[in-house]
Image (cartoon, helix red, strand yellow):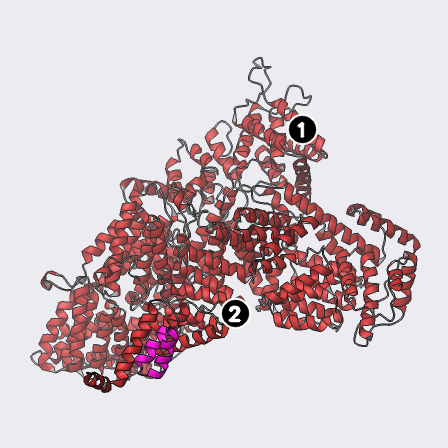
Amino acid sequence: MAGIVKPPGEFSITPHKVSVCILLQIYAPSAQISFHFPFASVAQHNRLGLFLLALTKSCDDILEPKLDELIGQLREVFGVLNPRFIDHLTTRLSALSSPDDLFNFFSEMRGILGSPESGALEDEQVILDPASNLGMFLRRCILAFNLLAFEGVCHLLTNIGVYCKEALSSCASYETTCFEDSSSNLEAFPEYENMDLENFVFKKVTEEIEARKRASERVSFHLHAPKALFNLVEDIEAPADPKSKHGDKVGEASSYVHPPDYALREFEPNSGIFLRTNWQIQGYLQEQADALEKNGSSFSLNAFELILRQLHKLAPELHRVHFLRYLNSLCHDDYFAALENLLRYFDYSAGTEGIDFVPPASGSNSFGRYEIALLFLGMMHFQFGHPKQALEVLTEAVRVSQQLSNDTCLAYTLAAICNLLSEIGVSSTAGILGSSFSPLTSIGISLSVQQQLFVLLRGSLKRAESLKLKRLVASNHLAMAKFDLTHVQRPLVSFGPKASMKLRTCPTNVCKELRLSSHLISEFSFESSTMTTDGAFSTAWLKNLQKPLGSAILSQENGSGSNENAFQFCVQPSSIPGSVLQLIGSSYLLRATAWELYGSAPLARINALVYATCFTDASSSSDAALAYVKLIQHLAVFRGYKGSVKKPNFSSCKKLNQVCCGEVLGGKKRLQEMVVLCANVTVMDADKGQMRYTPILKSSIVHFKLCLNITDPNVGLEAFAALKLAEEKFLSVSKSRILILKLQLLHERALHRGHLKLAQQVCDELGVLASSVTGVDMELKTEASLRHARTLLAANQYSEAAAVAHSLFCMCYKFNLQVENATVLLLLAEVHKRSGNAVLGLPYALASLSFCQSFNLDLLKASATLTLAELWLSLGSNHAKRALSLIQGALPMILGHGGLELRARAYIAEAKCYLSDPSFSVSENSEVVLDPLSQASVELQVLEYHELAAETFYLMAIVFHKLGQLEEREEAANSFKKHMMALENPLDDEDPLFNVL
Amino acid sequence: MNSKESCRSELRIAIRQLSDRCLYTASKWAAEQLMGIEQDPANFTPSNTRFQWGSSSIRRRFRTNEITSTPIAGVSYVSTPVMEEDDAVDGDFYLLAKSYFDCREYRRAAHVLRDQTGKKSVFLRCYALYLAGEKRKEEEVIELEGPLGKSDSVNCELVSLERELSTLRKNGSIDPFGLYLYGLFLKEKGSETVARTVLVESVNSYPWNWNAWSELQSLCTTIDTLNSLNLNNHWMKDFFLASAYQEIRMHSESLAKYEYLQGTFGYSNYIQAQIAKAQYSLREFQQVETIFEELLRNDPYRVEDMDMYSNVLYANECSSALSYLAHRVFMTDKYRPESCCIIGNYYSLKGQHEKSVMYFRRALKLNKNYLSAWTLMGHEYIEMKNTPAAVDAYRRAIDINPCDYRAWYGLGQAYEMMGMPFYALHYFRKSVFLQPNDSRLWISMAHCYETDQLRMLEEAIKCYRRAANCNDREAIALHQLAKLQYELGRPEEAAFYYKKDLERMEAEEREGPNMVEALLYLATYYKTQKRFDEAEVYCTRLLDFTGPEKETAKSLLRGMRTTQSGFPSMDVEHFSP
């Protein structure tokens, strides 16, 4: 009883099929019937045949065209001659007024089928071979009709009546009927009534309607190729040459992409007659699930819920709807609804519907698969930030799947636990992770969370490998890389000769894991049994779905045309499931993060860029936002905050894309395809005077601009401008990440310009975000208090700053956030430096240095070295030499990869070292001091870092004074004065972003 | 009593008006209440009553008009409105239509009235059309078993009917009965707030239509909506409130209302049954049983509410009484969902779960939304260890009524059986939330926390405490509490609970292993606490039992004596020879 899916593909007779039959009769009139349509030419006759062929092939579509749509298609195909067909069609249809008419009609239909033995043919006669496609269709129709009981015939009759009537009425005024449809919609009322109570504002309605439109636009799955493809093909193809069979078919296929606006009608109660098979509905749901996952919160909660509820009303036995409702509420952070729907889904389906249910071979497992329910529940708790509960549920999932020996589920559950442990700060798992599965607790050794995580990761990886779950293997490798990146590998059992253990992270390990993870794309072929961790569904299931749908038509048709390359290339991305692309994408993101930490700016940038260019289509919007955030941060650090926006040109866009895509997809063949494609694009450019984007190129112009800017130094675009663009792009989606970025930039800038009040305000905002209800984001939490400490430091409240930093250090230590530890220690050193306690600062700087060393954080190490040098310098002029050598050691790293601020600080420190060295004389070697100073002053002015800029000019003025260059001295002094003024009287003149806050 | 008299006459008129409009359920209900009023022996001789019931139609009609013209109702009550009568020719049409209607030829009836504009005719036409549509819909449900299930059939008359009635309402030419229909249509359409206001309007102007009240009640699922209704004061309102309170699980309030109503309607079977329902929810099975015995004596062919009686009999394990009841309803009307449910219960009690499931299935075929059949079927599946089917059945029950704590509880049990205690907890929490006074639920939940996998003992203790506070019949909670406290190393608290448990057992005169355990623990506890007097009392009590504990008690006693006497015992030994 639980979760029984009805057999797919029931062929039932519908009004649309009746009209196809009528057209068939026109195409192949039987000998007995008196009328024959005089076709203008053989070509026209053939065209009708092709048209019919296409119609019969798409008869399993989820949507059947309405009569007026059919008429429209006929008009398109046949041009002038059409009225005859159409008149005939409508008169035949409206002549069907009694059950007997239908009986006669179908017995007439039987007449046009040629019998196999009737060898003698008249010349003109077209005989429908019963074994041909059209013949089969006709026979199926007749059979379906004969199977109907009298009630069924009556229903068909009324449906035909409705079908004709709608066509007649909707011809006149589509707009009004459409409007009425939505207003008289039975379901709409309670929805809006409820919202009335929740301060429902009118604005929301329009938003909703738009969202609904958007949602409906996505329904294009019955032909598994993006619409853009057809546009492309149509453009290339010379129109309608009947001889060129191939081209004609493609053209036709494209005209049968139903206008997506009609998708909604499907779910209105009164159009229920057009509902198709279970598979198709499931396909729709699948599509929506993917879209939900990708676009997250850009879905309108209520609009989609409305559709789902109607769907549920129409198909109460289809429990997958509940799952979609779960996903929907998950995306909108509605905990209660999500929980409710998740439980409901699994109660009904017992985990045996949809997610590639393979009926178990042995009878022992026939009692449903509730362990999957546990897995999902755990994921949900994780998503909502209930780590403890999530852990409990997942532990139970482990137990149950062990009991039921569901290894796949076990592997995924272990992966989920790893994910949980690494993402969310759990200080101790004692008492939660029971003794049931951890192999080590049996020896009686208590492990830290990290050690446990490591053991788990290993186990999970091994299990996934032995089960051949490729995606899981890849994601486990990713998790491994993440672990290697942030955790020192300590020996699990702490005895024996410690000397043999390396207490540091190993970048090569990270790279190795990353590389292993991205092998996935090349070896991706077929996974026998899968489910993914975050609500994406299995490909196996998807593939089953595709079979009865339209993909067969497509694969036949891309035979051997000249446009094969483009065609294949466009089809390519859709053949790699989204989840795989997503995984690969996240490996790039992780690479970017890794390089950021290791301190290679160009590599970090290129990886983020690759992600933004190639994977934004496949990825979820929050990941995409993250990539943009990285890029923008990069801009801010290296290019300052404000500037003029120049217009980018598209040719370099194309070049860039080409390179990136080639690199990502790897292999020469793809690169070639890429080149061909780009050539196509260029050709079209020339032809049409406008750019058309193929799926992989179609991401919005915004990110072209962004990407371009980072690679091409000639186009000046600074962080704020880029941020504006990004905000536009992610208007509704993942607001928080962009918001955080905005706050970060604002804070940074306020600190530089000395707007301490503003900085404090922004900092508080950030703190509010960090203590949000949706989960504890440790990263954000550390970030917020780090910034707090820095603000306090900037306000010269040393002891407070030190206290905050200290407590932050404690927290990081507790949750094993080693990388952050290094930063915090550096900050503490900085605090002591600024407060004049250089001696106290030294140990902190050294500790930070050693942290950096063991984690290979090169850039941070360089900046720690710089701080160390500054500390030495402030101990007195006799340490200047030592400081100088330190700085010079760090300079290559700083100049190669450091941001503007760091570089400027290094320059200043270097100059100061020279100046304070008693053996150094300015007059002899003035350029050794002046060069770095002037460099620093330029960079600091870009940053608007008034304090340091003032210092620089002060030093410059002194140097010039010593050199006796009075004019220059005056100039530097003036600049100094200007910066001091700016620092003391902060002007809130044009803060472009703050007003948006 | 005047109010009784006025109720009586109001009801008499109402019954005629209702049955004249073919609202048979409502008129049946009203007639039951009429008979529920205590007859005045002075005014009514047996012949008099008989005459009254058997009066000719002309006369009745005459009487109706006579009575309505004189105001009879009390001050605060609305008086019976004078219903508009269509003139003679229309009346003939109406008579024909009504006879068609009585023969269940709805469309024909509606057709006869197609040109009539009287309010009564309009009402009957709409009602007939609505019923015709409903009938068609049900047929379609059976006919159309499409690939996606079957509930896509709708009553196709609804839209036009609703439109017609809404214009009538705007014109103001609509009577309370029309309003009732309008409310019904609006409810079906899904616009609940409007439906509620319309129905309130209807019952305010004509309170005797129970159908309207029950539609209204089905729209009031929370206490807030109930309180926000603006209802005129009338005794029918009390009936409504009582039943609405019951639905939103305010059982004692509802009971109070019914008891108040019993003052007037002392003999009403309906009220009796409703009281039984409330008592059942309060788990006073003994009372429910007596009420139902009484009911069956007065009304032996009653099938309504008898499924609840069967539940009570089931709970009390009276299989012979249950079989008698089952046989009785079977002979009365075997194709009523209630009958099937009773038979299912009978088989379940007999341990024949397959058969019982079959009968529950039959009940569900007769009424897809029959809540208790789903739940009971879930129980059967649990017995048969078919957990997925049980889960499915329970879930359906919940979808029909999300406040059914039994189904939530059943789901919890099912998942616990599958070894998913943490998952089950959510369901237990739900059921406990809905029925916080049921100790069984708390105990199950505590048990769940206690399982080896979870071992969340603190939470378990909290649950057991709740259970102990709400009259735990099986007396599990106290014992478990004591044990858990001991396990957690809190001997004083353990002693406290053992003592309490002991007191309880004494009060209920029960003996058993629990008693022995409690005594033994207390004895050792007090001994370690050096409170030897108390320890001795418990030890001596232990001596009454047979088994190893007796020996332990003896040795305890011996040990205590030696420590108590200390040196003296040595002395005794010393001086003994």
Label 2's element?
Answer: loop
Residue shown at 89% from the left, 64% from the top:
B48
Is residue B535 magenta-colored? yes
In the picture, the quarter occupied by the C terminus of chain B is: bottom left
Mark 2 or mark 1, whichever is nearer to me: 2
Q: Chain of mark 2?
A: B
> Quick one: label 2, few (<14), some, or many (20+) residues within 10 Å?
some
Instruction: Name the amino acid type tagged 1.
Output: Phe
- Over which residues does the magenta segment extend? B519-543
Say which of B90 and A607 sits in front.
B90
Q: Which residue is mark 1?
A: A105
Is residue B131 magenta-colored? no
How far across and down, in percent of the image, does residue A163 sit?
A: 65, 41
Separation of marks 2 and 1 at Cα, in angstroms: 66 Å
Say which of A697 and A682 sits in front.
A697
Instruction: Name the amino acid type tagged 2.
Output: Pro
Q: Is residue A367 above or below residue B551?
A: above
Q: Horizontally, is A358 left or right of B348 in the view?
A: left
Q: Horizontally, is A976 left or right of B471 in the view?
A: left
Label 1's element?
Answer: helix
Say which of A514 and A547 sits in front.
A547
Say which of A840 and A757 sits in front.
A840
**Is residue A661 in view?**
no
Dominant SS type (magenta): helix
Q: Is residue A431 above or below residue B331?
A: below
> Quick one: label 1, few (<14), some, or many (20+) residues within 10 Å?
some
Q: Chain of mark 1?
A: A
**Which labelled disc corresponds to residue B436?**
2
**Is residue B404 in view?**
yes
How far across and down, in percent of the image, does residue A925 sit?
A: 11, 74
